[in-house]
Image (cartoon, grey):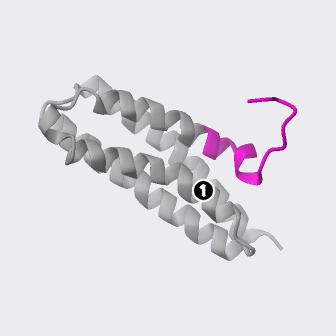
Amino acid sequence: MDEQAYLFNFEKLEVWQDARKFISEVYLFAEKFPKNEKFGLTSQIQRAVVSVAANIAEGSSRFSRKDFARYVQISFGSLMEVLSHGYVAYDQKYIKREELIEIRTQIKKISNKLNSLYRSLLNRN
């Protein structure tokens, strides 16, 4: 992307940038799932992780901070869904313990930033 190009507000948010990178990481993990999970767990975890970044972007277009904060909550819920799916993948032995730990580490980082964004949206005057 051209560095001189106009950036939308969500593109400037570090949490959105992190969520965008996390999408690629989760897609790589999901590639290890069996083919019979293509329309099951693979699809679920991919949709959930995409939803994290998408809800940040959509919320940033809202006209009130309260509305944006609601989308940040939805994004947080999608992030927790990714974690739950990660546990299912681990329990089914689709991913290793170390991979689950890596997923959790990224989720913790992103969730902390989402919580900070949420608080800042509700506390602004």
Q: Is residue 107 above or below residue 68?
A: above
Residue sitting at x 20%, y 32%:
33
Q: Residue at x 36, y 27 (%)?
A: 28
Q: Which residues are magenta?
A: 1-17
Residue 15 in magenta stretch: yes
Horizontal side of residue 116 vs 105, given as left or right = right
Q: Residue 105: give x, y in percent of width and height.
A: 43, 34
Q: Position of residue 54 (x, y in %)?
A: 55, 54
Determine whether the residue tagged by mark 1 lies in a helix, strand or loop: helix
Image quadrant in which you'd find residue 94? top left
Where the C terminus falls, by quadrant? bottom right
Percent of width and height locating residue 37: 17, 40
Is 107 one of the magenta-colored residues?
no
Question: Which residue is the site of mark 1?
Answer: 56
Q: Is residue 29 left or right of residue 10?
A: left
Q: How many marks?
A: 1
| Vertical position of residue 60 compared to residue 96: above or below | below
Could you tell whether 49 is left or right of 5 in the image?
A: left
Mark 1 surroundings: few (<14), some (14-19) or many (≥20) residues within 10 A: many
Which quadrant of the view contains residue 124?
Answer: bottom right
Residue at image position (77%, 50%) is 8
Task: Name the outermost residue toward the right.
Answer: 4
Question: The N terminus is located in which quarter?
Answer: top right
The kind of residue tagged 1 is: Ile
Percent of width and height locating residue 106: 47, 36
Residue at image position (43%, 30%) is 25
